[in-house]
Amino acid sequence: MIENSLIQSNFLGRDGFKWWVGQVAPEEAQGEQINGDGWGNRVKVRIMGYHPDNDVELKNEDLPWAHILKSPEGGSGRAGRGKPTQILPGDNVLGFFLDGDTAQQPVILGVFSSTNPAAAKSKDKEYTQPFVPYTGYTSKIKPNDNIAQSESGDQNKLSSPSNRQLDTETAKKLKRQQEKFKK
């Protein structure tokens, strides 16, 4: 009998996880998928170390589809319950391959947030080449100047303050102070 350690199954978790970091390809490569007219929750992604860092050797349109693994709070979408996926072109994502070393079935686990709110809101940074930051705007998602800087999702001095955990007495004092301030 052959030892199991000599046989690779290329099945999820059986031979270990094959992690990767990549960048979601531009809208033109996504076809109708990016605007909600495609099949499933998936996007085309260029994976660092697996795909060339130029779109001449491997065109964006030829990149593999990566399925997006949603958190339980995001829901599956069954019975009309589910939050929409918020991954857009230009996002840097983390994932793994369902098929191990074969590396043909990528799955996105999460997205790295932008660290600079001003850069994330830039309207003039279009796609130039793979792995270079650019906006996530698409033909259906336009820049929105109404989003407050504090709602950009970053953790910095402009971010919304965290909720406080207070005892009842302190909470009542703060509420009275806020009411006075509003008058």
Image (cartoon, helix red, strand yellow):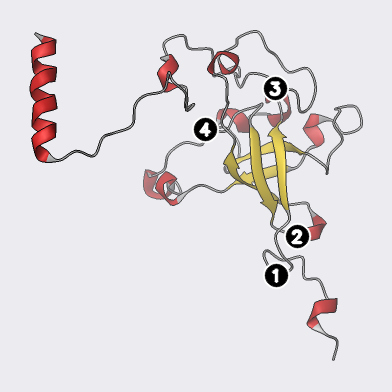
From the viewer's perspective, is residue 176 above or below residue 84?
above
Which quarter of the rendering shows the N terminus?
A: bottom right
Q: Nearer the viewer, residue 72 or 151?
A: 151
At which x and y percent is residue 43?
65, 37
Q: Secondary structure at mark 4?
A: loop
Amino acid bearing label 3 = Pro
Q: Earlier in the sequence, mark 1 or mark 2?
A: 1
At which x and y percent is residue 28?
72, 23
- Residue identifier under label 2: 100
User: How far apart, in angstroms, are the residues tagged by discs 2 and 4?
Assistant: 26 Å
- Residue identifier under label 1: 14
At which x and y percent is residue 106?
70, 49
User: How far apart, in angstroms, are the residues tagged by discs 4 and 3?
Assistant: 17 Å
Where, by quadrant of the figure, is residue 54 drawn?
top right
Amino acid bearing label 4 = Gln
From the viewer's perspective, is residue 58 above or below residue 49?
above
* Residue 162 as seen in the image, left or right of residue 25: left
- Residue identifier under label 4: 86
From the viewer's perspective, is residue 125 above or below residue 67?
above
Q: Secondary structure at mark 1?
A: loop
In this rendering, which labeled residue sits more in front, label 4 or label 1? Answer: 1
Where, by quadrant of the figure, is residue 102 drawn?
bottom right
Q: Earlier in the sequence, mark 3 or mark 2?
A: 2
Q: Earlier in the sequence, mark 2 or mark 4?
A: 4
Q: Secondary structure at mark 2?
A: helix
* Residue 164 as seen in the image, left or right of residue 125: left
Disc sitting over residue 133 in the figure: 3
